Image (cartoon, rainbow, N blue to C red):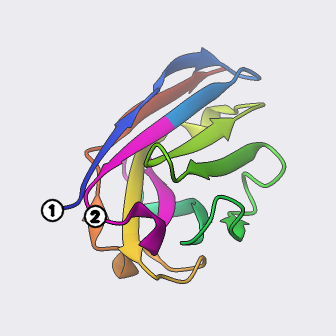
């Protein structure tokens, strides 16, 4: 029932910005912790950021590698979650996936998420 569709990926130069968006279809978006993960070629999928279920001001978490550069937010009225990515680096390159899980901890790992989008490519050139 839950479907996730990411958008906003693309090619950007180092130091630039991108804003990813994930549209959630299904019941009771506010019950879901929403996460962003990424996967670079030849590497495992890794946690990027998450925002806790509940109101828009919910607790957030970030990977150390993106802290201070990325900002996650959610709009429960529009059933969307966004990831604002600033000061992008070539090592941020990868496919970015949106994930959702009911009442998950904000630090949940990839294996704890049951719903995934199809991914959107982010490429940062040096």
Q: Residues in magenta? A: 21-42
Circle on res. 27: 2
Q: Where is residue 64 drawn, in percent x and y?
A: 75, 63
Q: Where is residue 89 drawn, in percent x and y?
A: 70, 33
Q: Quadrant of the N terminus?
A: bottom left
For label 1, count other residues whose C-alpha is less than 10 Å away and answer few (under 14), some (14-19) or many (20+).
few
The tag earlier along the polypeptide, 1 or 2, is 1
Q: Residue at x 64, y 50 (%)?
A: 73
Q: Residue at x 52, y 53 (%)?
A: 76
| Alpha carbons under labels 1 and 2: distance apart | 8 Å
Q: Is 40 on the left or on the right of 52, as rendered? A: left
Marks 1 and 2 in Cβ contact (< 8 Å) = yes
Q: Is 8 on the left or on the right of 83, as rendered? A: left
Would you place residue 34 above or below residue 106 in this image? above
What SS does tag 1 mark?
loop
Asked where in the image residue 58 lies, by quadrant, the reply is: bottom right
Would you place residue 77 above or below residue 29 in this image? above
Q: Residue at x 28, y 65 (%)?
A: 115
What SS does tag 2 mark?
loop
Asked where in the image residue 110 lies, by quadrant, the reply is: bottom left
Q: Quadrant of the C terminus?
A: top right
Q: Where is residue 22 drawn, in percent x and y?
A: 42, 43
All told, the count of numbered labels is 2
| Residue matched to label 1 | 1
Would you place residue 22 above or below residue 101 in this image? above
Which one is in front in this view, the residue at disc 1 or the one at disc 2? 2
Most extreme residue toward the right is 68
Q: Residue at x 39, y 50 (%)?
A: 97
Q: Where is residue 90 drawn, in percent x and y?
A: 63, 32
Q: Is 126 on the left or on the right of 115, as rendered? A: right
For label 2, count other residues whose C-alpha is less than 10 Å away and answer few (under 14), some (14-19) or many (20+).
few
Q: Is 33 or 41 nearer to us in this picture?
A: 33
């Amino acid at each position: 029932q839950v479907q996730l569709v990411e958008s906003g990926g693309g090619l950007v130069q180092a130091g630039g910005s991108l804003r990813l968006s994930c549209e959630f279809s299904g019941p009771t978006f506010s019950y879901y912790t929403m996460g962003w993960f990424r996967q670079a070629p030849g590497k495992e999928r890794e946690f990027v950021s998450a925002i806790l279920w509940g109101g828009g001001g919910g607790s957030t978490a970030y990977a150390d590698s993106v802290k201070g550069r990325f900002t996650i937010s959610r709009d429960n009225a529009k059933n969307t979650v966004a990831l604002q990515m600033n000061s992008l680096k070539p090592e941020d390159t990868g496919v970015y996936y949106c994930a959702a899980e009911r009442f998950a901890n904000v630090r949940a790992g990839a294996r704890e998420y049951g719903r995934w989008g199809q991914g959107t490519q982010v490429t940062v050139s040096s």
